[in-house]
Amino acid sequence: MLFFKELYEDAKNIKEKDPASRNLFEVVILYPGFHILIFHRLAHFLYQNKLLFLARLISQIGRFFTGIEIHPGAKIGRRLFIDHGMGIVIGETATIGDDCVIYHNATLGGTGKDKNKRHPDLGNRVMVGAGAKVLGPIQIGNDVKIGANSTVLKNIPDHVTVVRCNEIVHQKTT
């Protein structure tokens, strides 16, 4: 019963956060970010119970249907909102806190240098922008915003906005 309660909470959260959604029915039927949460919750349960092949199979089926890849070992908190999820990758040892938002093409991945814990930990209420790469066994604090196309390789404290800026964004006019 908890499984369905959490899914209802996820769908309700998506409806509230996405101005394009009109009702819960639309979220449940049409949103791949919601669909992958169903696949992941099932795959994670199987993973925790050492049914690793079956867990990966469910995960890969979810990836096929949604374009979102979440390893069954990843730990996801409550009310994750995956918006325009295509291309998202979340690694095996990643953890995601409650009330986070992840946009398309974002990666919570490894650097290839670490053993055991290889992926980042996101605190609560973290926003990961489109195309952002958060890599390695790092800690991202609560209420952090990671801007689009940013690459984060170091710990980030609470209440920080991380951006990548290669051009002038504000210029004084005369």
Image (tube, rainbow, N blue to C red):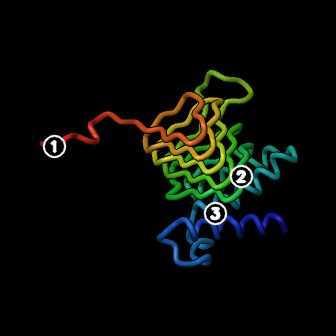
Q: Residues within 10 Å of mark 1 (few under 14, many from 20)?
A: few
Classify mark 3: helix, strand or loop. Answer: helix
Name the residue: 61% across, 52% down. 100
Residue 143 on image: x %, y %? 59, 47
Q: Give the vertical position of 85 relative to 159 (above or below).
A: below
Question: Reading the chain from its start, which is encountered first: label 1 or label 2?
Answer: 2
User: Which numbered dot is residue 71?
Assistant: none
Frontmost of labels 3 and 2 is 2
Q: Distance between the Cα atoms at labels 3 and 1? A: 48 Å
Location of mark 1 (residue): 173
Kind of residue indicated by mark 1: Thr
Q: Distance between the Cα atoms at labels 3 and 2? A: 16 Å
Evaluate if marks 1 and 2 touch, with contact meaning CB atoms under 8 Å apart: no
Name the residue: 61% across, 51% down. 125
* Residue at the far right in the pictured view: 49
Q: Give the vertical position of 31 relative to 52 (above or below).
A: below
Classify mark 1: helix, strand or loop. Answer: loop
Location of mark 3 (residue): 35
User: Which numbered dot is residue 77?
Assistant: 2
Question: Reading the chain from its start, which is encountered first: label 3 or label 1?
Answer: 3
Classify mark 2: helix, strand or loop. Answer: loop
Q: Residues within 10 Å of mark 2 (few under 14, many from 20)?
A: some
Frontmost of labels 1 and 2 is 1
In this image, 167 relative to 19: left or right? left
